[in-house]
Image (cartoon, coloured by chain):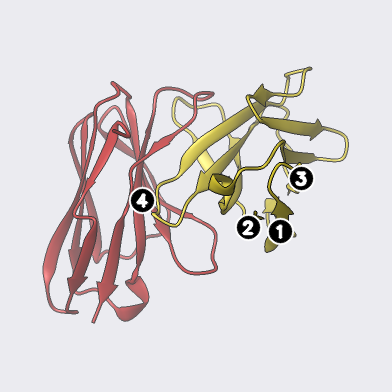
Chain colours: A yellow, B red
Amino acid sequence: AQKITQTQPGMFVQEKEAVTLDCTYDTSDQSYGLFWYKQPSSGEMIFLIYQGSYDEQNATEGRYSLNFQKARKSANLVISASQLGDSAMYFCAMREGHTGFQKLVFGTGTRLLVSP
Amino acid sequence: ETGVTQTPRHLVMGMTNKKSLKCEQHLGHNAMYWYKQSAKKPLELMFVYNFKEQTENNSVPSRFSPECPNSSHLFLHLHTLQPEDSALYLCASSQDNNQPQHFGDGTRLSIL
């Protein structure tokens, strides 16, 4: 069974508008972490935002915020005031386990296209 | 400067060749990772090294052989690869469980 589900293969948004990228997850762990990464066409994975399962507040980093709905097991990424440079693949990932290293499970990604 | 450097950026090799991918991290992290990213598939974790010890091998075929001589360097030795091994290979490093992994730019590998 997929542990991370991103149901939107592609999303379109106009510049300066907000967009929400969906992510649902499946885990039986009480302690876990959720990450969002951006991958431009050049290939590098850029960390955007992190939410711990015990964090009571939704994470925010500049124009990025994470809409964490624990009971629904969703961790949607909200990008406010989209910019042309936001066009990229976006991956949701979950960290399971409590060891010193992370075992991340990634979703299939959502391709975001920002138009002028 | 990403903090995690991968070389080469692109590699084309025949199925009988032997080559190595290199990853170096300048962040003082203690864990390093190899991922494979194929078209239209999620990133697949291949290997994890924690304090130079291999702690994870996700059923990767033996034609991929990792090496971690110290906590800053990670290699992936390739031999007798198959066309389906063509993919983007990403290296990452992290400090502890809750800090994000930092990725390199990847090596785009094409097997002829």
Mark 2 or mark 1, earlier in chain: 1
Residue visible at 24% across and 46% down?
Answer: B6
Give how far across and how far down residue B49 sits, in percent: 32, 37
Q: In the rendered structure, the residue with mark 1 lies on which chain?
A: A
Q: In the rendered structure, the residue with mark 4 lies on which chain?
A: B
* Badge 1 amino acid: Phe
Residue visible at 13% across and 63% down?
Answer: B19
Q: Which residue is mark 3?
A: A20
Contact check, label 2 and label 1, Cβ < 8 Å: yes
Determine the CA span between mark 3 and mark 2.
12 Å
Residue occupying the far front of the picture: A116
- Do the dots labelled 4 and 3 sit on one chain? no
- Do the dots labelled 2 and 1 sit on one chain? yes
Residue occupying the far top of the picture: A56
Q: Which mark is residue B90?
A: 4
Question: Badge 2: how crowded within 10 Å, few (<14), some, or many (20+)?
Answer: many
Q: Which residue is mark 2?
A: A113
**Which one is in front in this view, the residue at disc 3 or the one at disc 2?**
2
The quadrant in which the C terminus of chain A is found is: bottom right
Task: Say above or below: B2 vs A60.
Answer: below
